[in-house]
Image: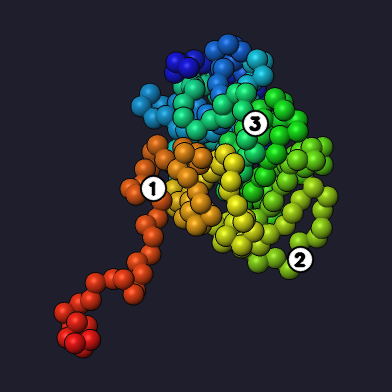
Amino acid sequence: MTVRILTCQVESVEDLTPDVFRVVLEGRGEAIAHAPGQYLELAVDDETWVPFSIASAHRGDDRLELHIQHWPERTNSARLRELLTHQARLSVRLPNGDCYLPQAREEPLLLVGAGTGFAQLKAIAEAALREDPSREISIWWAVRERRDLYAETLAAQWSLDHPAVEFHAVIEAPEVELEPQPGVIWHQGRIDEVLATELESLAGLEIYIAGSPGMVYACVDTLAPLGLEESQVHSDVFSYAPRVPFLPLPEADPESAPLSPGEAREKS
């Protein structure tokens, strides 16, 4: 799709947690068309555009949903919150991003996201389930604390409504107790470490990872020993923060490594 600049109406701004708020923008349906998983950019001023994943799959209607992390100490974040609260219309540039869900595919999905990275996963899951309610989807949402699961009820309901959907909530901070809850599989720890413990095979999966470069590549490194192929994993990080080599190099075998001069003398 061709990238377009348009003006959208700010329909609503709603706090989901003390740190995350949901924004609904309204624009012409055909103008805001996008693929599930793509992102848009909001204009903070004439020279500054800030990217956000679109948290809603395109339904042919006139609305876009965003999940925005508010960082009071960051200038752009504070200015954007001010704009969204007091300005009725904003300039938007979309669609952007090559990390999106193709149509008419049926591979099982492994969706991994951290924090507001859930926004991208939400759009992908919504589109996949609308196209095929029986599609296998495993959602892993990592947050620091339990309160950061701002859409926990929605993700749990997907799991309850669709037998082939699993929702895994990964809490990094120590918790006294994570009470059993229908539709939620609880884990504790860092997302890459949890995946290393819980996953056994990646065969046939299409994998989407949403988060910071450090989080994304930590997950790639965790999945590599399970037979991860570069073609089956997708993330916006691969475009704006590419890594060479993409997959971690195999560890050297101490028995086959060349000897240093000192070691050679000792062996002789």
Vertical order, 2 against 120 (above or below): above
Indicate the amino acid at tag 2: Glu
- Horizontal relation, residue 121 to residue 175: left or right: left
The CA span between labels 2 and 1 is: 38 Å
- Helix, strand or loop at mark 2: loop
- Helix, strand or loop at mark 1: loop
Vertical order, 80 against 150 (above or below): above
Q: Residue at x 74, y 41 (%)?
A: 165
Q: Residue at x 71, y 34 (%)?
A: 135
Residue for badge 2: 177
Residue for badge 3: 106
Q: Residue at x 46, y 30 (%)?
A: 98
- Helix, strand or loop at mark 3: loop
Whether residue 49 appears in this view of the structure is: yes
Q: Earlier in the sequence, mark 2 or mark 1?
A: 2
Judge the density around disc 2: few (<14), some (14-19), many (≥20) Cα neighbours within 10 Å: few
As drawn, the label of residue 246 is 1
| Whether label 2 touches label 1, CB < 8 Å | no
Indicate the amino acid at tag 3: Glu
Q: Position of residue 226 (x, y in %)?
A: 53, 55
Q: Residue furthest front?
A: 268
